[in-house]
Image: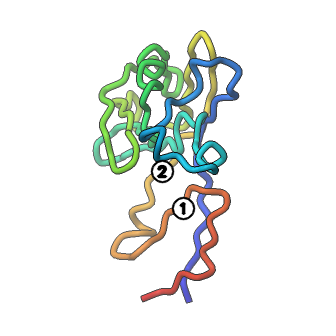
Amino acid sequence: MAQVLNLTLSSYVFDGSHSALQRDRLGNHSERDATYYNRYDFHTFFYDCYHDCEANEVVLVCPSLLNFEHVAKKTVYFIDGTETPIKSIDPISRGDVIRFDCPVGNPKKFKFGHDLFSGEVNVNVQRHDVFEGKNAIYAISRATNLNGCKNG
């Protein structure tokens, strides 16, 4: 029997109140089917915020930033109350990560502010102890049905 671990992510989604807070579209217009706009993620800034204890970085796991990269660079960030600039923005498979040098050893809060939005999330911890040496399925969709998945 597969083990199911339900993790709470520290994510942030723009409310869509300003056109600058709507993600550009991916792909060619001609490749978009009738359901494209219902499935596309226009407003998620980041999926999770966690502390990479080995690198001593706070990391934001994001969908492809596209036009949000400019917004990210104009945002002010705080880790446990200390203003912290972006260290790097790096592409990963189907997304980007934003990295920050961590000014404290075990960060708890990540706060951010921009003229158009602001927020605060918890800084999660890595889960190497849970996932090391295991196969795992990571689903970010609220509609993902894992009933057909089998171990092995």
Residue at 42%, 41% in the rendered image: 27
Residue type for callout 2: Val
What residue is disc 2 on?
125
Residue at 54%, 84% in the rendered image: 2
Quarter occupied by the C terminus: bottom left
Indicate which disc, 2 or 1, sits on the residue closer to the N terminus.
2
Residue 141's quadrant in the figure?
bottom right
Q: Is residue 92 above or below residue 76?
A: below
Find residue 68 and report its horizontal and vertical position in percent: 47, 26
Residue at 63%, 51% in the rendered image: 35
Find residue 53 and report its horizontal and vertical position in percent: 36, 46
Q: Is residue 152 above or below residue 146?
A: below
Residue 74's quadrant in the figure?
top left
Residue type for callout 1: Ala
Q: Nearer the viewer, residue 22 or 140?
A: 22
Find the residue positioned furthest to the top: 115
Could you tell me which secondary element the residue under label 2 belongs to? Answer: strand
Dot 2 alpha-carbon crowd within 10 angstroms: few under 14, some 14 to 19, many 20 or more: some
Q: Are marks 2 and 1 in contact (CB under 8 Å)?
A: no
Find residue 142 and report its horizontal and vertical position in percent: 66, 57
Dot 1 alpha-carbon crowd within 10 angstroms: few under 14, some 14 to 19, many 20 or more: few
Q: Is residue 73 above or below residue 123?
A: above
In this rendering, does residue 106 appear at all?
A: no
Say which of marks 2 and 1 sits in front: 1
The disc label shown at residue 139, or none? 1
In this rendering, does residue 71 appear at all?
A: yes
Quarter occupied by the N terminus: bottom right
Is residue 121 found left or right of 79 in the rendered image? right
Residue at 63%, 49% in the rendered image: 34
